[in-house]
Amino acid sequence: MHDAQGVPDNIDSVTVDLPGGGQATLAYDGDIPGGNSTSGFYTLFGEPLPADGSYAYTFHVTDVDGHSAQHTETFNAALLPPVNPDSLSALYDASGRAIDFSWEPVDGAAFYRVEIYPNTPSLYNRLYAFATTTNSYRMPEGFLKPGVVHRYRITAHREFFDENVDNVSSSHSPFSTEMPGLLVGPVTPGDVNADGLVDLTDALQLLSLMIDLTPSDGVYAAADTDGDGKLSMPDLIYILQNVGGMRPNE
């Protein structure tokens, strides 16, 4: 949605006429990444995808001054079955740096997309997307921050398309909240900020994480120095001992 007077402040309502009859209200869902205050996303949650076919959706927008506009978009649905989540695999190669993804092929897929997200994914915070025509992909090292858990999903697509012109002729598997997280190694215990050093900065960042002063989408595995699944005082002591030279070269 774009409005020169501001989005969402200048927007009163956004609705859509559904193909099967009836009208639904779209909810504001955040700014467009890299955009500005005049653009934003509006989303309709919970509307089931239609069966294969061609459908017309008419959108109506009204601003706070009573001005209105409408736009009709044709949606061509030709959905593929989802990628089998039980077939997903993400393993490091022999170097321990690159990550090899693989999954069962989907009949009718022209290509697949490997999508990488933060540990708390949403529709609009994707970090990377890699396309492949086979049911495997090797992601080179250097894309993911060391020691931080990321999530991934694999989408299968019936046709090649521009990033902004999709028609959803694809199958979007669930975000990998039930699937393996990606943990980039090697992880240096105590290197909370993943800068290659264990120093006072790591101790301060861990302390902030422990008292929830630094909300983060990442899970800092390096901060859990004793591997107990918690950020606690023993982890802080470990880092301070490194800083003080009591644990040299660990």
Image (tube, rainbow, N blue to C red):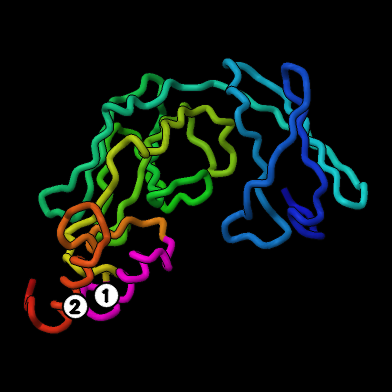
In the picture of the structure, the residue carrying the numbered disc 1 is 203
Q: Which residue occupies the foreground of this view, 235 or 89?
A: 235
In the figure, 203 relative to 58: above or below? below
Q: Image point 82% across, 42% down: which residue? A: 61
Say which amino acid is labelled 1: Ala
Q: From the viewer's perspective, tell me whether residue 36 is left or right of residue 134.
A: right
In percent of width and height, residue 221 lies at 24, 58
Query: How far, Cα to Cα, is label 1 from label 2?
Result: 7 Å
Instruction: Answer whether labels 1 and 2 touch (C-beta < 8 Å).
Output: yes
The segment highlighted magenta reads 195-215
Residue toward you, 198 or 67: 198
For this orientation, the residue located farthest to the bottom is 244
Name the foreground residue: 3 vs 44. Answer: 44
Confirm whether residue 63 shows in the render.
yes
**Residue 203 part of the magenta segment:** yes
Residue 209 in the figure: left or right of residue 250: right
* Residue at (40% x, 52% y) in the render: 118
| Mark 1 or 2, nearer chain start | 1
